[in-house]
Amino acid sequence: MRQTTTCSIVVPVFDEEENVEPLYLALKPVLEGHPYEIIFVDDGSRDRTFERLSEIARKDGRVKLVKFRKNFGQSAALAAGFERATGDLIITTDADLQNDPIDIPKLLSKLDEGYDIVCGWRKHRKDRYFGKRVPSKIFNWLASKSSGLDLHDFGCTLRAYRKDAVKDISLYGELHRYIPALAASKGFKVCEIVVSHHPRRYGRTKYGATRLMKGALDLLAVELVERYLARPMHLFGLLGFLSAAAGGIIAGYLAALRLLYDVPIGERPLLLLAVLLMVFGIQFVVFGLLGEMMTRYQYESGAKRFYEIQQEIGFES
């Protein structure tokens, strides 16, 4: 790590009272001797996590703390940490001690090679095979194919970022998984290295089938957002045109039957289908216009924060 470059460590935390102090003690020797700050974001913990972190922050001025009013999710926690990070380089890691802080210098050395984001790859995961590893393999394959970014592990939180690569990315839902893909679509350089992974020692995992499903839905959202965020009319207008065109073709066919061959068409289901397709086409166009107006409003008014802060410690100076 460079002597003159401040590194911000951002750690989202949720119900990890037994892990936060060991994590802090593991981070210190890796970072000691270099300018750094550690930002813990308590994502609405229900145990004594905030109290433990407050004690650490009182003893070490380099430790800063954000407490959410309730659980808003890991993406919101990372967004809050990114907004408050003062370092030019940002490291993110989980608080469950499964990521190893000893890998941080390896991530930073890859940034020295010219990359903007370095992602950890938990090649030898210490999790349940069918419960977490198999679903994760399937999900990572889908994410890699759909995003066009060849990563093995979209779910690993241990990553290194240049601040410029994340400062304009809006995070919500489970979009933190796709920060590298979102950044790569803007021209930032992304790479991946193998990192250590340890079994969970304390507490319970916060990941399950529900979260995986939410991540898959957000993957679809990322694809649509990246392609059509600034031009929603292109998506809805195309759907509207295709729907209306299909309805028009069917209606023309029925009209030809009625006018040329005097065939009754009033009882045909095709007539109802033609009407519905044309109506849907008009609706899609209207949705596109509404999307255009909402996009313009968003760009003019600024993005909305998806979390509420109850307390902050260490940011006074």
Image (cartoon, helix red, strand yellow):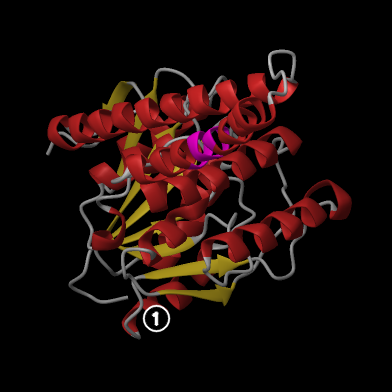
**Left or right: where does residue 151 sit relative to residue 124?**
left
Q: Main secondary structure of the magenta part?
A: helix
Give the position of the N terminus as an image quadrant.
bottom left
Specify the segment rendered in magenta.
Answer: 242-248
Comparing 139 with 133, the one in front is 139
Question: Was residue 245 drawn as part of the magenta stretch in this picture?
Answer: yes
Residue 217 at x, y = what percent? 60, 39
Residue 153 at x, y = what percent? 62, 63
Question: Was residue 206 drawn as part of the magenta stretch in this picture?
Answer: no
**Left or right: where does residue 195 sit relative to residue 29?**
right
**Left or right: where does residue 232 sit relative to residue 217?**
left
Can you name the residue that lies furthest to the top here?
267
Residue 33 at x, y = what percent? 29, 69
**Amino acid bearing label 1:** Ser
**Left or right: where does residue 166 sit relative to residue 282?**
left
Badge 1 local density, few (<14 within 10 Å), some, or many (20+)?
some
**SS at mark 1 in the image:** helix
Residue 48 at x, y = what percent? 54, 24
